Amino acid sequence: MLPEQRLLKQNTSNSANKSSALDANQLASLQQSVADYSSLQLAWASGYLAAKSEQGQYAQLAPAPLAATVAAKTLTILYASQTGNAKGVAGQLEKNAKAAGIHVVLKNIADYKAKAIKNETHLLIVASTNGEGEPPDDAIEFHEFLLGKKAPKLPNLSYSVLALGDSSYEFFCKTGQDFDERLQALGAKQVSPRVDCDVDYDSDSESWTLNIVETLKEELTQTDAPLATVSNIGDLPTAGAASVYTKQKPLAAEFSLSQKITGRDSAKDVRHIEIDLGESGLTYQVGDALGVWFENDELLVAKLLTELNFSGEEKISLKVAGEVEAFTLKAALISQLEITQTAPSFIEFWANASKNTELVAVASDKNTAREFAGVHQIIDVISLAKADIDAQTFVDALRKITPRLYSIASAQAEVEEEVHLTVGIVSYEANGDTRTGGASGFLAERLAEGQKVRVFVEHNDNFRLPQADDTPVIMIGPGTGVAPFRAFMQEREARDASGDNWMFFGDQTFTQDFLYQTEWQNYLKSGLLTRMDLAFSRDQAEKIYVQDRLKEQAADVFSWLERGAHLYICGDGNRMAKDVHQTLVEIIAEHGKLSTEQAEDYLKSLRSNKRYQKDVY
């Protein structure tokens, strides 16, 4: 909550005869006025206006005493979040700091004026890493500024960084590492070491948060009355108010439908999933993701226990929601521990425990370990070699189950109390058995109609339709990447949006893999969908992909971009998204008569202006 938003409630509550809120123009004017303020200046302005409100007049106030009170007593927290995890951690950090009496300014890093960093005294950054070591979309400009030549020296800045990432990727926590190393190079003082968190980040982030608040509490705790008045100004309710259902407190929703939408001869099993939110009040926007908690297959757990020579009744302990709880090994493997995705760290653990030469060789190279982990579940790793370990040691080497995030394939304007997903079932053969993905197998095979599934909405402000309904959009979503664009079309139809819509879809075959074919054909017939280009890779001798269709329509693609189109990519981030990006660079360079570097800058500008957005995995 920005200080000007806090002031809104404070000012209006002091005058019953006043309107309860600024109108849109007044709020926009206020936000524009303070856009370049540093956190200290914002805090000063907050107290300045609060004092005016308390006096009930708009006379000139002497600012010097208040400024002296506020100086060096603000903690700025910035979050760089692609899917919402960093935002959630930063929000909890803000709560803890406020509870300790610290005045806090919390901001999305995209809304922070990078040059204002020279005025900061205390800064905390919570940053996730996107794709192959890239900063989240919101952090691109700040990242470029901080690592560039214009970044100022920061000898008076105290800071710390919490980095979120996935150790399955080569550039684990790269964005947080970049921020940390650069701040040190600019002369800032690290008040607590950077912490790099894996996908199971709750425990590490909680420890870092508690440590940081304890470290800064004495230095930043507010004791002066004027400052206390500023910090206690109430929060305004906003349209984006947090849901009562979260990752930690999910909704137990009713599972309604799992329908296969690929043909019987398809090489893929893709399901259309429907979940009934009932009267929960849980809402979402198109572009958001649905987090799904799952339980592991009991048959797989039984096989794993047999392979380990455990009964399943062994007693073990795990930390759950900050508290240590007791479980039987079997119960923990079903409901608490990840066994269908293997982390490179587990391969290293099992290699050391078993002394198996093959695993030792795999574990010795990080890239090899990541590749090996991607195609071997936990049971496949332990089948390679025996190790003499106890149950507690085994579970300590496993990750906790983390919810899977699926791009939402529906708009509430169309489906109301439902939420739809498009889920590709992960399935392959290994050691004579079929291996199935934890969450996809749960949704497709182990949940029956009417049963409960724990879900929550992960808001994604980096994948939004343009606010202006007359803006054209280009959507590129092969395979299950089609999901959010189905939602986009439902939303644009509900809004009666006049903007043109162009869809690029691809998969293996037209007859077996054209997901939601009838719906797309109806949108074309009605005119809501302006154009659709299809790329089915196996319907001809030479494989054709969506990037090939983009090349064929290069002139029109560039023309749409020049007239303000928003560009979206959803789907595979390892190959498809990279190939599409490179094709776009080539298209822009050729038709814009630009160099490759200038074409990259063109796309970078689109990203900064929220006109080029990606939801890749």
Image (cartoon, rainbow, N blue to C red):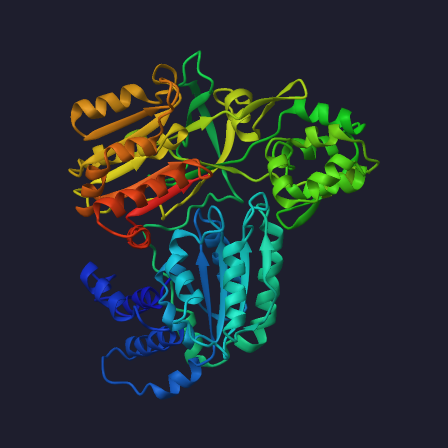
Q: Nearer the viewer, residue 19 or 92?
A: 92
Q: Residue at x 51, y 20 (%)?
A: 448
Q: Nearer the viewer, residue 555 or 164?
A: 555
Number of numbered markers: 0
The x and y percentages for residue 276 are 41, 28
x%, y% of residue 450?
A: 48, 22
Q: Residue furthest right?
A: 388
Which quadrant of the structure image shows residue 438? top right
- Tell me if I can see residue 550 in this picture: yes
Relative side of 187 to 495, left or right? right
Quarter of the picture containing the N terminus is bottom left
Residue at 36% x, 17% y is 539
Q: Where is residue 109, by image quadrant?
A: bottom left
Q: Position of residue 523 (x, y in %)?
A: 22, 25
Image position of 439 (left or right of 342): left
In the image, farthest residue toward the top: 264
- Give the left or right position of residue 42, taking residue 98 as reference: left
* Image: 52 above or below 526: below
Between 79 and 24, the one nearer to me in the picture: 79
Q: Is residue 281 visible?
A: no
Q: Where residue 308 sits in the image (x, y, percent)?
A: 78, 29
